[in-house]
Amino acid sequence: MMVAKKKFHSARLHVRQFLSKYRYSLASIVLILGVWGMASAVAWNYFEQEQELQEATSQQQLHELDQAIERLEAEKQAQEKLEEEKRKAAAEAEAKKKAEEEARRAAEASQNTQAGGTSGSCNTASSHTNPNAIDVMVNKKHCLKPLSFAPPDLVSTHGATISAKAAADFNRMYADAVAAGQAFTVSSSYRSYATQVSTYNYWVSVNGKAAADTVSARPGFSEHQTGLAVDVGVGGCTLGCFGGTSQYQWFQANAAKYGFIQRYYSGYEHITGYAGETWHYRYIGVAAAQDMQAKGIKTLEQYWGMEGGTYR
Ligand SMILES: [Zn+2]
């Protein structure tokens, strides 16, 4: 028992001695450990914060990327919608155009019927049918073929729109009339098929077809559509007024020299189909016009031996 107690005392003494001997070293170790621990904690903390920051940043970037993708997709959809609308509008415009074209054709067809049939049945002549030739016959028995013919060589000169085939002689006539003190004006020349359609239909709507036929040629039956006819006057003195002018006397004496003839004389209605028109001149070329004048023939129907008068 005593021995054990003595051993214990000895051990405590050794510990005390040890502590006393190494107290500075031990204090230093504790201090170093403490400083190291704190430094580690600070470093760890910093590292964690840094990592959180990085995570937050990459999440923010991801979010922004998502938003950008959404924006792009929205833009793409808007673009597609716009193009779809454009396609639809174009298709609608095309359909509308087609419908209008169809309606116009149907209207023209009905007008042609109303006006006396198609060119197949309204002109059965075997000669004088070429609308591009200066010897074409156009009267109430002979429509233009095709009915909607338009001269390909129209020119504008001295207030007239006429076929180039008549222009040179017309210009000579105009210059000579002016030189002779007989200047004239043009009140009407080329008239298109479409113009004649609306003019004729206007008169039909006013007084009916029979009355319209007395004042307006049916579409496709007017000499004005050939580009070879002119209505002349002297300023405001046009149509019936022209017959009382000195210019009319000059035309009677001289128009044939330039290939023009007065197309409708009074007293020949049953042959030409029209009442006298002192103002309406038709180009047939110098040779034919002078030949008619020399022979004293007053109508193209008689000169070419072709049927005239009223409509079939
Ligand atoms: Zn005329």
Image (cartoon, rainbow, N blue to C red):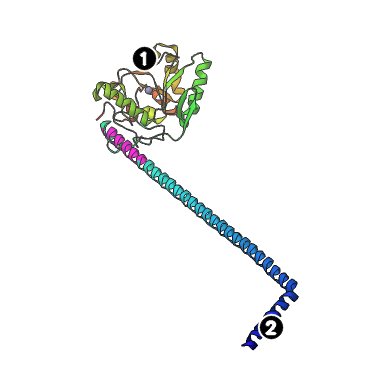
The residue that disc 1 covers is 240
- Tell me: is circle 1 under 8 Å from ligand 1: no
Asked if the magenta segment contains residue 53, the reply would be no
Q: Which residue position holds label 2?
A: 10
Image location of residue 178, percent across then percent down: 51, 16
Q: Where on the picture, by quarter, is residue 234? A: top left
The amino acid on which the numbered mark 2 sits, given as a three-letter code, is Ser
Residue type at the position of mark 1:
Gly
- Mark 2 near ligand 1 (CB under 8 Å)? no
Query: With respect to residue 211, does 134 lie above or below?
Result: below
- Residue 123 in sight in this render: no
Magenta residue span = 96-113
Secondary structure at badge 2 equals helix
Q: Nearer the viewer, mark 2 or mark 1?
A: 2
Q: For mark 2, does the 10 Å Cα neighbourhood hold few (<14), some (14 to 19), or many (20 or more) residues?
A: few
Q: In which quarter of the image is the C terminus?
A: top left
Q: Distance between the residues labelled 2 and 1?
A: 162 Å
Q: Where is residue 241 in the image (x, y as percent from the top left)?
A: 38, 13
Q: Which of 121 and 128 is in front in this view?
A: 121
Image position of 137 with respect to 43: above or below? above
Q: Residue at x 53, y 16 (%)?
A: 179
Magenta: main secondary structure equals: helix
In terms of sequence position, does the residue under pointer 2 or pointer 1 come before the other?
2
Callout 1 secondary element: helix
